Amino acid sequence: VTVGNPGDNVTIDKPIGRHPLYRQKMRVVPDPTKGRQRRVAPRFQTEKSPAQVGRRALSFVQNLAFNGKLSISEVRIETGRTHQIRVHLQDRGTPIYGDDVYGISDWNKKLSKQRGILRPLLHAYKLEISHPITGKDLVFCAPMAEDMATIVDTIWPTGRDERPELF
């Protein structure tokens, strides 16, 4: 569940690295070719760390429903970076509802006060991985938690009929 509408059929291909000040947080690393450039003499140039450059992160977003304020979005990730979905959606200006690290505190307080929910409304209904030894494809599915399903029902009343596997 996101605050705002992240868009339909969106591809997000932006590198993710550690935040330079808040080391527990991740961020989309700014593109050095855009914006203000500082020229540095070659002898003072240093090799950038992976956190400064970021690692490639690729996400595909499909919006399933939008009620004017909140969206139900399906995100498929090609890479598996730390906090990838949360960081990519926050960078688009549509953070996960209830996310106290990357979200909007006023919205999170409202969720807590009205619904008693103190967690991000983020759910992995399906994980597909290759077994590290055998290489066999493994698929894990899990039903949505009831507190989240209740909110999803208000945003997307036809969701259980259209996509029952999500619930």
Image (cartoon, grey):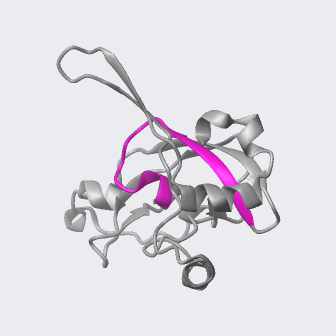
* 132 displayed left or right of 153: left
* 22 displayed left or right of 27: left
Which residue appears at 28% of the width and 59% of the height?
Answer: 51
Determine the image quadrant of residue 83. Answer: bottom left
Quadrant (top left/top right/bottom left/bottom right) for the C terminus: top right
> Where residue 161 sits: x, y (%)?
76, 37
Quadrant (top left/top right/bottom left/bottom right) for the N terminus: bottom right
> Where residue 103 sits: x, y (%)?
53, 73
Which residue appears at 58% of the width and 68% of the height?
Answer: 97
In this view of the protein, can residue 5 be seen by the observer? no
Tell me, yes or no, whether the highlighted magenta stretch contains residue 34: no
In this view of the protein, can residue 138 be seen by the observer? yes
Which residue appears at 21% of the width and 24% of the height?
Answer: 132
* 112 displayed left or right of 50: right
Camera-side residue: 56 or 129?
129
Camera-side residue: 47 or 139?
139
Is 105 above or below relative to 86? Answer: below
For this orientation, the residue located farthest to the front is 146
Determine the image quadrant of residue 23. Answer: bottom left
Is 134 above or below relative to 64? Answer: above
Q: Which residues are magenta?
A: 70-86
> Where residue 117 sits: x, y (%)?
52, 73
Tell me, yes or no, whether the highlighted magenta stretch contains residue 73: yes
Which residue appears at 56% of the width and 84% of the height?
Answer: 109
